[in-house]
Image (cartoon, rainbow, N blue to C red):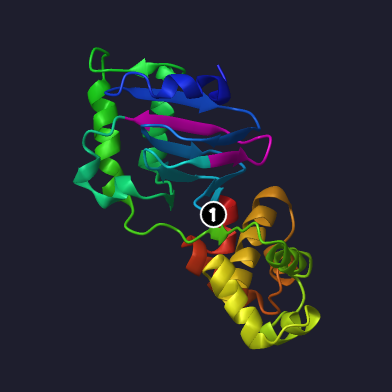
Amino acid sequence: MSLIASLPDINKKPASVFVMHEKSEKLIPSHVHSKGQLSYVEGGIAYITAEERTYVVPARHYFWIPAGLEHTLRIGLFATVLRSLYFYTHNDNESPFYRQLGIYPASELLIQMINYTERWDGRHVTTQDNNFEFLIALKKLLPELNNEALPIVLPVTDDEMMNKITRYLDRHKSETLSLASVSKKFNMSERSLSRFFQTKLKISFLQYLKTLRMIKAIEMIIKTNKSIEEISYDTGYKNPGSFSNAFFEFTHARPTDFRKR
């Protein structure tokens, strides 16, 4: 059973955990469910869009989506395996972790625990099932694994002019870009362009550009065989050391270690 076909079933049995291990490229349209979602991205990249932001989830990372949050999910590479658990919510007030969307690197312990749940693929697991305590322990473990979500997120907007600017940044990300050069390109003052980003995207121009470059770097590391030095130049960094430091800030891993994963 596919995840799209399973969406109506997820909300059934509020006290259960619904398990779904999906192994194909998909676009899951905007939807909402009454359970918290834990998903581990085994390979490739997943993209979550919620509350006018797109979150990028690289391979060997997991994400938590709180109950009641409308979102769209895109699995962006054919080889991706998405392993998902939809949890009951009666104890969500025990930790702030359960009430916010976040992306986190997956530890070996968590990976093994999630892989173990494949035995329940495609069905609800309840207190009547053997080893339900295992799923209880898994959920309780999550707030203890990571204290800080990775900032791999880009705001999105329907504003036509802003989208022209962000598409330009994407196409020219390997070049030297500055607030001055981009504002001149679009016949705006630097102050106006800076305010435009803050008004439409709630982020500064420089932070948007840096995040865009890091997301493209993650995609190239996962999808291509380019060297880390090539990727640094392709994303606008003239110094591979500076690129490595910026990448570490976003992912808590050096580019070479990230690729090894």
Q: Label 1 belongs to which residue?
A: 52
Compared to residue 50, the image places residue 209 above or below, namely below
Compared to residue 80, the image places residue 55 above or below, namely below
**Image quarter in which the N terminus is found:** top right
Compared to residue 169, the image places residue 97 above or below, namely above
Q: Position of residue 64 (x, y in %)?
A: 40, 43
Residue 76 part of the magenta segment: yes
Compared to residue 95, the image places residue 34 above or below, namely above
Q: Is residue 91 visible?
A: yes
- Which residue is depicted at the point 74% across and 63% down? 167
Q: Position of residue 42 (x, y in %)?
A: 54, 38
Q: Is residue 76 left or right of residue 167?
A: left
Q: How many marks?
A: 1
- Along the viewing direction, whichever of 250 and 253 lies nearer the viewer: 250
- Along the viewing direction, whichever of 93 and 228 lies nearer the viewer: 93
**Residue reaching furthest to the top:** 128
What secondary structure is the magenta-colored segment mainly? Answer: strand
Residue 58 part of the magenta segment: no
- Which residue is depicted at the point 29% across and 28% down? 135
Q: Position of residue 245 (x, y in %)?
A: 54, 73
The kind of secondary structure element at disc 1 is loop
Question: Which range of residues does the magenta coloring cover?
Answer: 72-87
- Which residue is depicted at the point 65% across and 74% down? 240
- Which residue is depicted at the point 57% across and 33% down? 81
Q: Position of residue 108 (x, y in %)?
A: 40, 42
Q: Is residue 244 visible?
A: no
Badge 1 amino acid? Glu
